[in-house]
Image: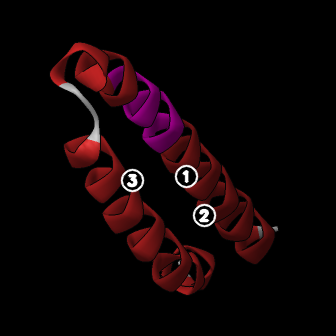
Amino acid sequence: MFAGLLMLPLIVPLLVLAVALILSLPSSLLWLAGSGLALVAFGVLCDVVRALWRAAQGRHA
């Protein structure tokens, strides 16, 4: 659980920066940036869940 909490201060500014970048793009590129951001966010979420799962498994083993 602590691994996810430690990554939070790193993830939040990156998300804010990504949102600011998307808002500054022309509307024609907006859907492309949004889909890319969604893929990156999904990947980060999977990494955090995997790290939490490994930590939980290590605790029980």
Q: Which residue is mark 1?
A: 49
Q: Which residue is mark 2?
A: 52
Look at discs 3 and 1 and give the one toward the viewer: 3
Q: Residues within 10 Å of mark 3 (few under 14, many from 20)?
A: some
Camera-nearest residue between 36 and 21: 21
Query: Can you tell which quarter of the image residue 61 is in?
Result: bottom right
Above or below residue 54? Residue 58 is: below
Camera-nearest residue between 32 and 2: 32
**Residue 4: image tag:** none
Question: SS for tag 1?
Answer: helix
Q: Residues within 10 Å of mark 2 (few under 14, many from 20)?
A: some
Colouring method of the image: secondary structure
Q: Which residue is mark 3?
A: 18
What's the CA distance linking mark 2 and mark 3? 25 Å
Above or below residue 37? Residue 44 is: below
Whether residue 58 sits left or right of residue 17 in the image: it is right
Q: At 57% from the left edge and 76% from the top edge, which residue is drawn? A: 7
Dominant secondary-structure state across the stretch colored magenta: helix
Q: At 46% from the left edge and 36% from the top edge, which residue is drawn? A: 42
